[in-house]
Amino acid sequence: MKNFMLLKLVYIAVMIKISSSSNPSVAMNLEKASINLNKILFNYRKEVVPIYENKPVNVSISMYINDMVPLENIPKHFSVDFTLRMIWEDKRLVFEDNSPEAYVAFDAQVASQIWIPNIYFPKGKRGVMHDIIAKNVFILVYKNGTVKYSQRLSVLSFCPMKFRLYPFDIQDCSFELETFAQSELYVNLKWMDKPIDRKTDLNVPDYSNVKIRTNSSTRLGDFGLNFTTLEVKFTLHRDFTLHFLRDFFPCILTVMLSWVSFYLSYKSTPARSTFGITTVLTIVTMSNNIRSTAPSSKTFRSLDYYMLICMIFVFGALVEFAVVGITDPDFSPRWKNKGKRTKKNYDIVSVKEPENKGSEPVIKKIDIGPFVLITGDQHVIDNCAKIVFPLLFLFVNAVYFAYHRIHPETVNK
């Protein structure tokens, strides 16, 4: 029994030794890290690019996007919060260690003492290097001279946003990275195998979908030197559902409310005028609110055109009431009177008053259960407007939304 327990303990010890030695990356303790730091920084010149055998330094880059906010109130700008990751090789940082892939972890203070690619953002307007609680920078130096660098940044970048088709628009924004001082003869930038990574819950306000693509190219810069440019293309699809419920649907209800006056008696002047003026003022107020919250644009947007269409329909319902007030209730089109004799000269004829002068006028009505429909006092123009206005508004909406659905700048690319 004792021999069995002894063999078991020996087996466990061997397995722990094997598992610990199989770990490819081993962090150093404080003493060894201090010794290696003194060795690798002795006579080190961070101003010199680590070029060997006349070959440029290959810098592999990737980005982890934490947050992205299109700043539509600041025309043609958007903000990106991301972590920049870079990997390159510097033979001057080689050190000796028994572990096959040992590394030393440094912070921002040590990172400022070694050579780092001079990366800048051509379209960036201003940026923030996060330093709460400490500078968000860390660097790993491996025994073979490989350097892995990571830093968190926030950059306000330029984007030529176009709002002509707002809120059906699709915005294309690009974010570029270059080396400012080193041409491609010194530094060659390239994307990693997985160039862009982002949070699974990344949410861009007012946009339902964000597509990210990468590209690399060479740009002719100052003094005829070529510089490597890495580009990140963001395609932002605006969320139309939110705007339909917030902007379009209330406008549709307001237009439909203006049609209620068609079902009122043409003699009900106070009620019909109240309906017309109220709906007109409502559309005007909604237009002002939408204009103040929508992104600023020098041109008319699609939403502005729709508000104008709703304004025309609501104003048309008010004009229809004015036309009703100055026309004959029994007015009929000319084609209905074709072939009938018309009287050109009218004589004033005295009409004898009816005997039942004090009696109430006869009102035509239809009883449908608890509801009573008044069929009298209906103007012929009101009867036509009940059909023409809804059909015309339905046709205009069908054309408007179909146009934006098939437009090449609004469909999903």
Image (spheres, rainbow, N blue to C red):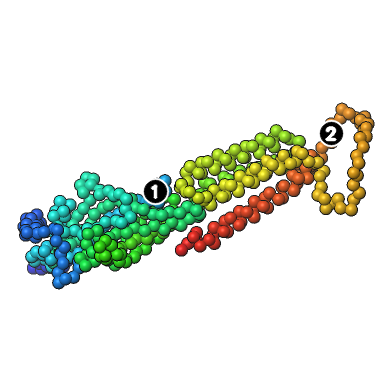
Which residue is depicted at the point 57% across and 45% down?
A: 250
> Whole-Å distance between the Cαs marked 2 and 1?
66 Å
Quarter in which the N terminus is drawn: bottom left
Q: How crowded is mark 2: few (under 14 residues within 10 Å), some or many (20 or more)?
A: few
Which residue is depicted at the point 34% across and 60% down?
A: 232
Check the image and name the residue furthest to the top: 358
Residue 173 screen position, x and y as percent: 39, 57
Q: Is residue 19 at all visible to an observer of this figure?
A: no
- From the viewer's perspective, tell me whether residue 110 is left or right of residue 269: left
Specify the amino acid type for callout 1.
Leu
Which residue is the site of mark 2?
Answer: 361
Which residue is the site of mark 1?
Answer: 71
Disc 2 is placed on an element classified as loop
Specify the amino acid type for callout 2.
Pro
Disc 1 is placed on an element classified as strand
Residue 115 screen position, x and y as percent: 16, 59
Which residue is depicted at the point 36% across and 53% down?
A: 158
Q: Nearer the viewer, mark 2 or mark 1?
A: 1
- 246 to 270, vertically: above or below: below
- From the viewer's perspective, tell me whether residue 367 is left or right of residue 170: right
Task: Name the image quarter holding residue 261.
Answer: top right
Check the image and name the residue furthest to the bottom: 53
- 168 to 352, vertically: above or below: below
- From the viewer's perspective, tell me whether residue 123 is left or right of residue 398: left
Residue 402 screen position, x and y as percent: 58, 59
Residue 369 screen position, x and y as percent: 75, 42
